[in-house]
Image (cartoon, rainbow, N blue to C red):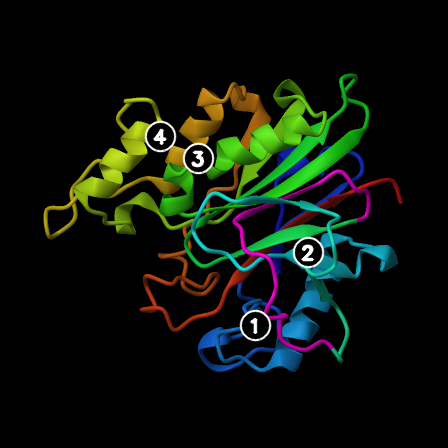
Amino acid sequence: MLIKSALLSAIPGVRHGFSTRLGGRSAGPYATFNFGRDLGDDDAAVTWNLRRFATLAGFDDREREIAQLVQRHGNTVRTVPASPSSIAHDALSDTRGPPAEDQAEGDALITFEPGMPVGIRTADCAPVLVACLDDTEQEVIAVAAIHAGWRSATQDIVARAIEALEAGGAHRAHMKAAIGPTIGASAFEVGEEVIEAARKSLRGRTPPMHASLSASGRPCLDLPGLVLAQLEQLGFAKDAVDDVGHDTFSEQSLFFSHRRDAGLTGRQLSAIAFGSR
């Protein structure tokens, strides 16, 4: 089962999806729609899940590979296509093995290549998908998938991805972004150092937080709210951003949550591609 952004779905030529945990073949703590290959799940099940995601997202035959990275909660942005050794393309076939050891690290992927899906994995962090239109807003020219956990978000991963898109010829005035399922503010208890890092990323503004402190008296960060504030700070109009609004922590039947499940859990996949069919 995928969740789709109404904003991105309205753009001709864009195909995308934010996965839930429903509809796959994984078992145990990874049941059922897991996309993390390095967690202990059955590799054949993950391969089947990837193929199913591609079908549900509307990816066609030339889009049978989803470019992904080894995610490090940093601010490195990679561009696809790249040399085969630098980006791992997750081939959707039964013969697919574990990711290569030299798979590139990073937390955002961008592409100007039609028919090249890019994706990131999450289990509480904020997934952000971006579509860039040309100056006439008639055609899509690039897309991005961004992994925005609090560490990446406070290291400006969103801004760096937008800047990389602009370096390739896109303009932020013609970009649309969707924030996928993320841990809700009420469950995202953090330390003051995280709040301070978020404040710095917003140029001194107080970051969005839950109205009440946690039971232990600590602040609770609104992570999707932080990403939204960063996009607005980057010049995105309110109608250019869509927050799909799901809480990975509280919606246990729908989503994996690293915090709720103490790390023993699967990963959602968020991916996007563009181009006429």
* Residue placed furthest toward the left: 217
Which mark, by number, is residue 156? 3
Cα gap from disc 2 to disc 4, whole angstroms: 28 Å
**Mark 1: few, some, or many residues within 10 Å (few <14, many ≥20)?**
some
Q: Earlier in the sequence, mark 3 or mark 2?
A: 2
Q: Earlier in the sequence, mark 4 or mark 1?
A: 1
* Amino acid at circle 1: Arg
The residue under label 1 is: 37
Q: Are marks 3 and 4 in contact (CB under 8 Å)?
A: yes
Q: Position of residue 100 (x, y in %)?
A: 63, 70
Q: CA distance from mark 3 to mark 4?
A: 7 Å
Residue 10 x/y as whole percent: 72, 33
Q: Residue at x 64, y 33 (%)?
A: 7
Q: Are marks 1 and 3 in contact (CB under 8 Å)?
A: no
Instruction: Kindly tell me whether residue 219 is visible in this rendering.
Output: no
> Which circle's residue, 2 or 1, is located before the other in the chain?
1
Q: Which residue is mark 2?
A: 67
For label 4, the SS is helix
Q: Nearer the viewer, mark 1 or mark 3?
A: 3
Q: Is residue 22 above or below residue 12?
A: below
Question: Which amino acid, by three-letter code, is at mark 2?
Answer: Ala
Query: Mark 3 belongs to which amino acid?
Result: Asp
Disc 4 residue type (three-letter): Ser
Q: Nearer the viewer, residue 135 or 163?
A: 163
Q: Which x, y percent locates residue 271?
A: 64, 51
Q: CA distance from mark 2 to mark 1?
A: 14 Å
Secondary structure beneath disc 1?
loop
Percent position of residue 237, x then y: 54, 19
The foreground one among 204 and 27 is 204
* Mark 2: secondary structure: strand
Q: Which residue is mark 4?
A: 201
Q: Earlier in the sequence, mark 3 or mark 4?
A: 3
